[in-house]
Image (cartoon, rainbow, N blue to C red):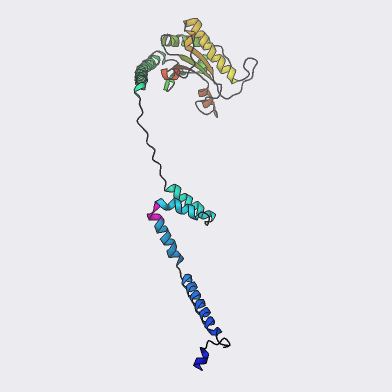
Amino acid sequence: MRDELYSYDQNYINRWIISYADFITMLLALFIVLYALSLLDLNNLQNFSNSVKKYFPANKQKIYENNLVSMDIMEQKRQLSLIFNTTKADVKLSNVDISGQKEQINKLKNDIEDINIKLNKEAVEFTNIENLVENKLSDIKGLSVTRESRGLIIRLKDAVLFDAGSDIIKDKARVTLDRLAGVLKDIPNSIRIEGHTDNKPIKTSRFPSNWELSTARSTNIIKYLINNHKFSPDKLSAVGYGEYMPLTSNFNDEGQAANRRVDIVILSSTSKIFEPSSNQ
């Protein structure tokens, strides 16, 4: 029987078993391979890939380019961010040659020193003027002296110089202006006369608003100093602020009285920088 089973007789009907056995063997091998692949740890593979990227940064761009097609949009953004964050550009400034600018730098230093000297000298002069005004004019009611960054301010309440709603200098006020002129005439600084009102509206044929009233008052004081005391017109200026530069609130009579005033401002040298200058 055994000889008959392995017979090479072409008519033997069981010879297909050999081919079947080979097929089953190959199929078994296939399933074993598939089973082995199913046990592959993807997390370990990812850790291994990250380690390679960490210790071989020169390959980052190449890895990125090889895998760009297979990445989704978020992965592409992450890789781009990684590339840009690990790319450093050091910018170094070369030494600047300022040899040609030394003359200008020295001139600037000298100008600054001159300004400091002028400011110190001016501070002493302002102190002297302030003391002089307080000593000679302290008896004038409604006069005060204060110092600000723009200069020395001699402040007069409007009632000292003008009647309510008028720009005509009162007769008694002329004596006050004469005494002030004696102190101010020889001062080399520019002088600005500033008119201020309270917030009470005025509407007359002469003064449609407080702008006109405050400006007319400061202008008339300038005219008085020029005509009666020969002040140089180019060192004087007139400003009218109306009700828009108050010292305090206009809610009560005391506040309104404080805001109605004339400020005679002896401008500092630094303030003159911002003033218009003549080309002549």
- Image-based side of 107 in relation to 84, left or right: left
Residue 182 percent coordinates (x, y)? 42, 8
Residue at 50% x, 76% y is 26
Q: In which quarter of the image is residue 43?
A: bottom left
Residue 163 visible in the snapshot: no
Residue at 43% x, 52% y is 60
Residue 200 percent coordinates (x, y)? 59, 24
Residue in the foreground of this view, choosing between 241 and 54: 54
Residue at 44% x, 21% y is 150
Residue 50 visible in the snapshot: yes
Residue 178 percent coordinates (x, y)? 46, 8
Magenta residues, start to end:
53-57
Q: Is 67 situated above or below 175?
A: below
Residue in the foreground of this view, choosing between 69 and 166: 69
Which residue sits furthest right?
Answer: 205
Q: Main secondary structure of the magenta part?
A: helix
Q: Is 68 situated above or below 182?
A: below
Which residue sits furthest front?
Answer: 9
Residue 37 percent coordinates (x, y)? 47, 70
How many numbered tags mark residues here?
0
Q: Is 243 situated above or below 180?
A: below
Residue in the foreground of this view, choosing between 277 and 50: 50
Residue at 52% x, 90% y is 5
